[in-house]
Amino acid sequence: MRGRMGGRGSPRPHTPAELRAGSTADDPADPGVPEGLATTLALVRSRLGADSIDRLWIFPPMTRGRRERGLVAISCFAEKERRRLFTAAYQARRRGLDLGVDPELVEQGLAPADSLARVMTGVVRRESLHLGEPREIVVGGDAATLDRLAAELEERVRVQGL
């Protein structure tokens, strides 16, 4: 694994094509850091409250070995047919038993509820790594939906033996 991260004997990739080839979503050789998404969603829930969350869009993370960068877009109920849009970006890394997760929640502004699907499509279209479509989760202010998602993520961590 050392070579993939730029150790001796294997130069670190420099071209955009080489970087894309080393950045994956759902590649079993790159387990990523599943705790990163779980920690980020826990932050989102604690700061925004489950009852205020309308939808989540979980974008496929960029993984390299035991490093991961990801993004979650969150729409929250606002006045009438408008939604407050937030993004939660995170960087996570694991080295042995050491785990680091750095999430950041940022309010992006207000938008009409019916425009958010187009906004997410635009994000995917402009994204240069082509990691894939986001997973959309309709929360509708239901805490049980977030509980099921948290359980799913905990299971993913358990299955990977972490």
Image (cartoon, rainbow, N blue to C red):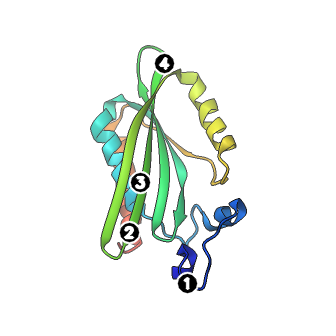
Pointers 1 and 4 in contact (CB under 8 A)?
no
Q: Compared with residue 4, is residue 79 higher up or lower down, i.e. above or below?
A: above
> Disc 4 to disc 2, how far (Cα)?
39 Å
Secondary structure beneath dot 4 equals strand
Q: Residue 88 at x, y = what percent?
A: 43, 42
Q: In which quarter of the image is residue 140?
A: top left
N-terminal label among 1 and 4: 1
Q: Residue 133 at x, y = what percent?
A: 62, 47
Please tell me how crowded label 4 is: few (under 14), some (14-19), or many (20+) other residues with Cα within 10 Å: some
> Disc 4 to disc 3, how far (Cα)?
26 Å
Question: Residue under circle 4?
Answer: 82
Please tell me how crowded label 2 is: few (under 14), some (14-19), or many (20+) other residues with Cα within 10 Å: some
Q: Compared with residue 19, is residue 10 higher up or lower down, i.e. above or below?
A: below
> Disc 1 to disc 4, how far (Cα)?
53 Å
> Disc 1 to disc 3, how far (Cα)?
31 Å
* Kind of residue indicated by mark 2: Arg
Question: Residue under circle 3?
Answer: 37
Question: Residue under circle 1?
Answer: 8
Question: Residue under circle 2?
Answer: 94
* Kind of residue indicated by mark 3: Leu
Secondary structure beneath dot 3 equals helix
Q: Quadrant of residue 124?
A: top right
